[in-house]
Image (spheres, grey):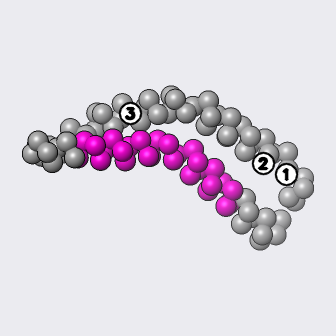
Amino acid sequence: MDTSTVLDLGREGLLIMLEVSGPVMLTAVVVGLVISIGQAVTQIQDQTISFVPKIIMMVLAILYTLPWITSLMVEYSTNLITNIPARL
């Protein structure tokens, strides 16, 4: 296995990781921003208020995107495993 193959596998793995974690992280950022704006408007400065809604929305985002994430990971794993002889 040469250097370019290893770099391609690493790049592909990182891109898949970003695609899988992107919707959940984006949900957390948006919910955190909305709650922060709400806290600034109401002048409530409790740091723990944002955790529960953020966790709930992240779980909902995971449940909503789970079929897509599963198909993406299965496709990546299948491609990786079937191409082992060609990459060696």
- Write the residue at 67% across / 61% down: 11
The residue at the far right in this view is 86
**Mark 3 is on which residue type?**
Met
* Residue 59 occupies quadrant: top left
Q: Examine the rendered structure and indicate whether residue 64 appears above or below residue 29.
A: above
Dot 2 alpha-carbon crowd within 10 angstroms: few under 14, some 14 to 19, many 20 or more:
some
Image location of residue 42, percent across then percent down: 11, 42
**Mark 1 is on which residue type?**
Ile
The C terminus appears in which quarter of the rendering?
bottom right
Decide whether the magenta segment is chiefly helix, strand or loop.
helix
Residue 13 or residue 40, whichever sits in front:
40
What number is the disc on residue 57? 3
List the residue tagged with mark 1.
84
List the residue tagged with mark 2.
80
Are dots 2 and 1 in contact, CB under 8 Å?
yes
- Write the residue at 69% across / 56% down: 12
**Mark 2 is on which residue type?**
Leu
The region drawn magenta spans 10-36
Name the N-terminal-most of marks 3 and 2. Answer: 3
